[in-house]
Structures are given as C-alpha cells and as structure tokens.
Amino acid sequence: MASATEQDSAEKVVTADVQKIAKDVSEYVVKATETEPGRFSVETSIVDPRGADGSMPALQAVRLCNLVTQNFDAKYVSILEDDGTTFAVYGSPMVNGGECGEY
C-alpha cells in the first residue's frame, strides 16, 4: 500500500487547464486535480440554494462538469461546492445515467 505522501504525489493539479477551458465559469474554479488517471475533482466557489426548479449555480456546475468531460480523458468528475459537498458528477450510473448531472 502506498504511503500518504506517495498518494498525494500521484495527484496532478490541473487548475489552470480547467480554468482555461471553463471560460465563462472559470472564475468559480478554485482548484482542480486529477486524483488518478481519468478521475477529476474540481473545487469551486459555487454555492447552491437548491431550488426545486434548479438554479443558476446548478447550471454552472453542470456546465463545468461537461467542459471537463469534453476536454479531458475523464472517466469520473466531481464538481464540489464552496463548502466541499458534491454538487455535480459525471461517471456515476446513479446520477443522470452516468452523464454530468446535479448530485
């Protein structure tokens, strides 16, 4: 089993790359990492009010998720809210049939 230091060093920071492709939602990207090949975690400053009809923040999170899946060889993407909770995901059959969707 790899040590915590070895596991941390396997993560690849891709914040600038994600901000570059995110364009109109790049201001919300705080940190993006490829935690293992094809698996991405994007920390954002987005705060979701969780309205019944969706919300602008939800649309922004799903858009960011779609941009990551379209521009990287992503098998799984997790878009995190400002408080660290998962907001949108890609690659989970339990959410939107495996496509980007609000979690």
Image (cartoon, rainbow, N blue to C red):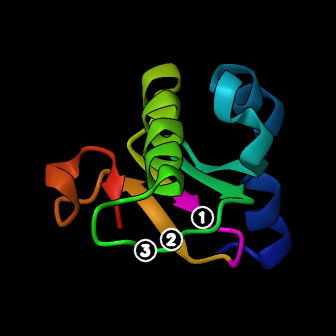
Q: CA distance from mark 1 to mark 2?
A: 4 Å
| Dot 1: element | strand
Quadrant holding the C terminus = bottom left
Identify the amino acid type marked 3.
Answer: Arg
Q: Which residue is mark 1?
A: 80
Q: Which residue is mark 2?
A: 86
Say which quarter of the image contains residue 24: top right
Q: Position of residue 42 (x, y in %)?
A: 64, 52
Kindly identify the residue that appears in the image at 79 percent across and 64 percent down.
8
Kindly identify the residue that appears in the image at 25 percent across and 44 percent down.
99
Verify CB contact (< 8 Å) between mark 1 and mark 2.
yes
Q: CA distance from mark 3 to mark 2?
A: 13 Å
Kindly identify the residue that appears in the image at 43 percent across and 57 percent down.
55
Relative depth, front residue between 83 and 41? 83
Res 50 label: 3
* Total residue callouts: 3
Kindly identify the residue that appears in the image at 28 percent across and 62 percent down.
53
Q: Tell me which numbered mark, 1 or 2, is placed earlier along the sequence.
A: 1
Identify the amino acid type marked 1.
Answer: Leu
| Dot 2: element | strand
Residue 22 within the magenta-colored segment of the rendering: no
Q: Position of residue 64 (x, y in %)?
A: 54, 39
Q: Position of residue 90 (x, y in %)?
A: 35, 49
Identify the amino acid type marked 2.
Answer: Thr
Verify CB contact (< 8 Å) between mark 3 and mark 1.
no
Residue range in magenta is 79-83
Q: CA distance from mark 3 to mark 1?
A: 14 Å
